[in-house]
Image: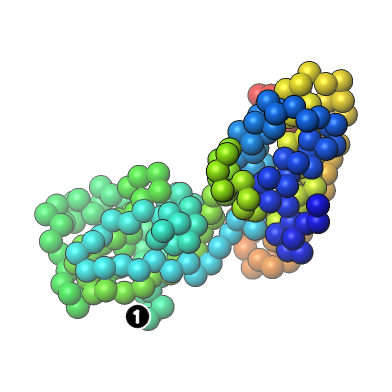
């Protein structure tokens, strides 16, 4: 199988590649891999503040009379947690919305009737896992822009999503595939598990170093910990991969 030039391997191609590496045609193992892929990608993406998860200028169409919005694929093209929003801004009216707490909105405007059809949102507050509230509650139709960190793709076994590509870019997929291979070997109680897991940890460590260098170069005006957080050691990665505390 040949990888896509920029997206790499799809979910189904990753599963096939791992089964071929292990030398298995076991349908139960295939099902395990399909069911594990989403969890594995989520865990991989938590190992570092990867630059590929950072998105800018995502469009959010806001409508008069609607002041709560879910940050999902239908609204902004990606899934995003409210806590991972860096900024929301209105380029048309040159406004950067100020983040406040829901309690502040309730104190300022308990009846939620401030604003008018000629106003613009000036504040926003996270109110649920992936939901935000805009203030003032009455405003003109507009398109806001969002900068923030997205969640990875979700693969679902036995559905068309297995044909989609992971959020992890091609250049970092080798370490990810090696990690999922190790999980499969562990599931099968295969003696190759420790060495493959160790190999995966080394690959991912190098990928983190590469990604962190890119972040430092492209975002040098920010503090390093603001850009990519803690730089993981091989011990940190091993703990994450082996799920140790």
Q: In the depicted view, which residue is nearer to us: 196 or 53?
A: 196
Element at label 1: loop
Number of other residues with Cα within 10 Å of mark 1, as a class: few under 14, some 14 to 19, many 20 or more: few
Identified at 80% across, 47% down, the residue is 174
Q: Quadrant of residue 134?
A: bottom left
Looking at the picture, does residue 240 appear above or below residue 60?
above
Kindly tell me whether residue 33 is visible in this rendering. yes
Looking at the picture, does residue 130 appear above or below residue 200?
below
**Residue 148 falls left or right of residue 46:** left
Q: Quadrant of residue 98?
A: bottom left
Residue 9, horizontal then vertical, whole percent: 73, 52
**Residue 21 falls left or right of residue 162:** right
Q: Residue furthest top?
A: 189
Q: Quadrant of residue 88?
A: bottom left
Looking at the picture, does residue 127 appear above or below residue 87?
above
Q: Which residue is mark 1?
A: 93
Identified at 68% across, 25% down, the residue is 28
Residue 181, horizontal then vertical, whole percent: 78, 34
Identified at 68% across, 51% down, the residue is 10
Identified at 69% across, 68% down, the residue is 218
Task: Say how many tags the image has.
Answer: 1
Looking at the picture, does residue 206 appear above or below residue 135?
above
In the rendered image, the quadrant that contains the C terminus is top right
Kindly tell me whether residue 36 is visible in this rendering. no
Residue 37, horizontal then vertical, whole percent: 64, 38
The structure's colour scheme is rainbow
Q: In the depicted view, which residue is nearer to us: 94 or 181?
A: 181
Residue 17, horizontal then vertical, whole percent: 79, 42
């Amino acid at each position: 199988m040949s990888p896509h030039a920029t997206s790499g391997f799809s979910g189904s191609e990753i599963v096939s590649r791992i089964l071929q590496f292990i030398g298995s045609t076991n349908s139960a193992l295939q099902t395990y891999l399909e069911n594990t892929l989403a969890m594995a990608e989520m865990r991989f993406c938590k190992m570092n503040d990867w630059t590929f998860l950072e998105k800018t200028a995502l469009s959010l169409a806001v409508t008069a009379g609607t002041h709560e919005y879910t940050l999902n694929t239908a609204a902004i093209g990606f899934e995003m947690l409210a806590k991972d929003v860096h900024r929301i801004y209105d380029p048309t009216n040159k406004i950067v919305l100020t983040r406040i707490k829901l309690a502040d909105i309730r104190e300022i405007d308990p009846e939620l009737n401030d604003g008018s059809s000629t106003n613009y949102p000036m504040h926003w507050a996270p109110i649920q896992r992936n939901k935000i509230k805009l203030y003032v509650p009455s405003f003109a139709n507009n398109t806001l822009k969002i900068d923030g960190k997205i969640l990875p793709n979700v693969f679902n076994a036995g559905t068309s999503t297995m044909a989609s590509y992971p959020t992890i870019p091609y250049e970092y997929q080798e370490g990810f595939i090696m990690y999922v291979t190790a999980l499969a070997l562990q599931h099968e109680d295969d003696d190759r598990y420790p060495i493959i897991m160790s190999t995966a940890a080394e690959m991912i460590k190098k990928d983190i170093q590469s990604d962190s260098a890119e972040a430092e170069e492209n975002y040098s005006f920010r503090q390093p910990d603001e850009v990519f957080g803690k730089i993981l050691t091989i011990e940190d990665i091993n703990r994450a991969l082996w799920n140790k505390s």
